[in-house]
Amino acid sequence: MELVAFRGIITSEQKQALRDANYAGLYGMSGEQALVRVRRLPFASEPEEFMGTPEYIANEFQRSQTAEVIKNRNVQGEQEILNVAEDVGVQIRLTIERIGGTMPEDMPVYRRLAKGEWMTPDLLHSVSFDWDEEMEEVGDRVIPTGRTVENCITLSSC
């Protein structure tokens, strides 16, 4: 939002229009409220609060690439910025579809974490660490890379 503040996106309505353009491109729907309805999220909630890691990363990637295009092409003006945001989202959406990934709107909806909660209780109890457990010394072990000498003869990347 800081980048576009100097390029024509100033008011809260314009900022909402940019969020809508981001969601429109990536999700193939009209905007944030359509996403809330389709995903059956609580009214007036932030969609990010219900996203898992892959969906959240897709959204952040879309926003970061939009910012890069705006900066690299020196895009100015509200409509031009909204067009870039939606176009970048569409391109990412098409890439996800082409590689056979899960479309953002089909990713699972997670419950919102309570204030101060960093992991859902079901995950918290399924992972346990014994911090006092003795660890084996690593020493000078060779870490396998998946490449063998035979492969390196035929691969120029070794």
Image (cartoon, rainbow, N blue to C red):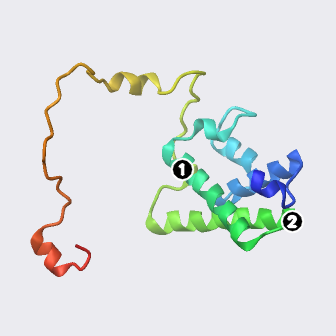
- Under mark 1, the amino acid is Ile
Of the 4 image quadrants, the one containing the C terminus is: bottom left
**Mark nearer the viewer, 2 or 1:** 2
Kindly tell me whether residue 1 is visible in this rendering.
no
Image side of residue 7 versus residue 92, left or right: right
Element assignment for label 2 = loop
- Under mark 2, the amino acid is Gly
Element assignment for label 1 = helix
**Sooner in the amino-acid sequence: mark 2 or mark 1:** 1
Residue at left offset 77%, top offset 51%: 2
Q: Residue furthest top?
A: 132
Asked which quadrant contains residue 87, the reply is bottom right
Residue located beneath label 1 in the image: 57
Q: CA distance from mark 2 to mark 1?
A: 27 Å
Residue 9 on image: x %, y %: 85, 55
Disc count in the image? 2
Depth order, front residue of 114/97: 114
